[in-house]
Image: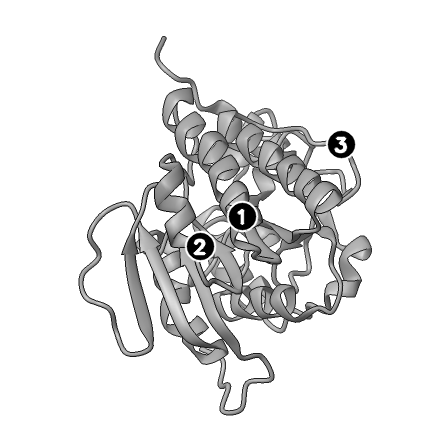
Amino acid sequence: MLQTPASPLQIPCLLLTGVNGNLGKVLRPRLKAYCDVLRVSHRKDIGKAQIGEEVVIASLEDKQQMLDLLKDVNAVVHMGGVSTEQPWDPILASNIVGMVNLYEAARIQKVKRIVFASSNHVTGFYRQDEVVNTRMPPKPDGFYGLSKAFGEDLAQLYWDRWGIETVSLRIGSSYEFPKDRRMLATWLSFDDLERLIVAALTAPIVGHSIIYGMSDNQTTWWDNTHAKHIGYRAKDSSDIFRSEVEAKQPVIDSNDPVAIFQGGAFVKVVHPS
């Protein structure tokens, strides 16, 4: 974890949604350094508040719960919602209806900045032999990626019409270490995830900005040139794991869509009819 003895950022009340998700659990202890009060939320009971926290049970699909959740909040780190490829109904509820409820609550409660956990799966059907920048058209690889593309468009609407700033983070693969060859390109360390979120919260002006969430990996499919104003600088790299990963996965089937497209296994998910 980053050492932040004297944080330049001190938000009176910062909201972290989806606190019981994989990355929510990682961020919960880290974000406390940047706020007076960290309000954490999940749809189910997550136990008692820790020091410096407020715990709120809230479902994204419930308008009134979201309105109450965002009361007196200064900024939001939105990690809530469905985070994997799923059938349409749960994605519609959390990632479509829930996103509208979140932004409507932000508008009413006068929250001015949101850091939105989008996904690299917004562009998952670009090939692995292409480099994609943040201004190229989406090519979602499934319902999940499609919902995140909607979230980015929604963020743009609320910036253009109501002046709510958003940084949409197209998060790659944020784990303790890369698990396969694909993640040598997509890996985002936990420390770099923290750096990315802090940069998104502290950049003076962002409007609606999109940035890929990745570490300083030698192999990359994503170009963040148009997001340099955010000030994110990765310090970690997947390359220290390269030999180990390649030894575990020595052969790649070049005819497999998982190896052809940037979305990896997501491009092959089939939902039962």
Above or below 198: residue 256? above
SS label for mark 2: loop
Q: How far across and down, in percent of the image, does residue 100 sit?
A: 52, 36
SS label for mark 1: helix
Q: CA distance from mark 3 to mark 1?
A: 31 Å
Q: Nearer the viewer, mark 2 or mark 3?
A: 2
Disc 2 packing (10 Å; few <14; some 14–19; many ≥20):
many
Q: Nearer the viewer, residue 154 or 129?
A: 154
Write down the quadrant of residue 149 in the picture.
top right
Res. 60 in view: no
Residue where numbered disc 3 is placed: 137
Q: Nearer the viewer, mark 1 or mark 2?
A: 1
Q: Nearer the viewer, residue 98 or 258?
A: 98
Image point 72% across, 41% down: which residue? Answer: 161
Q: CA distance from mark 1 to mark 2?
A: 9 Å
Q: How far across and down, in percent of the image, does residue 112 sit?
A: 62, 58
Residue where numbered disc 2 is placed: 70
- Residue 108 badge: 1
Write down the quadrant of residue 176 in the picture.
bottom left
> Residue type at mark 3?
Pro
Q: Earlier in the sequence, mark 1 or mark 2?
A: 2
The C terminus, quarter of image: top left
Check the image and name the residue furthest to the bottom. Answer: 5
Q: Earlier in the sequence, mark 3 or mark 1?
A: 1
> Residue type at mark 2?
Leu
> Residue type at mark 1?
Ile
Q: Do the CB atoms of the residues marked 1 and 2 lie less than 8 Å apart?
A: yes
Q: How far across and down, in percent of the image, does residue 144 sit?
A: 49, 31
Image point 33% across, 55% down: which residue? Answer: 41
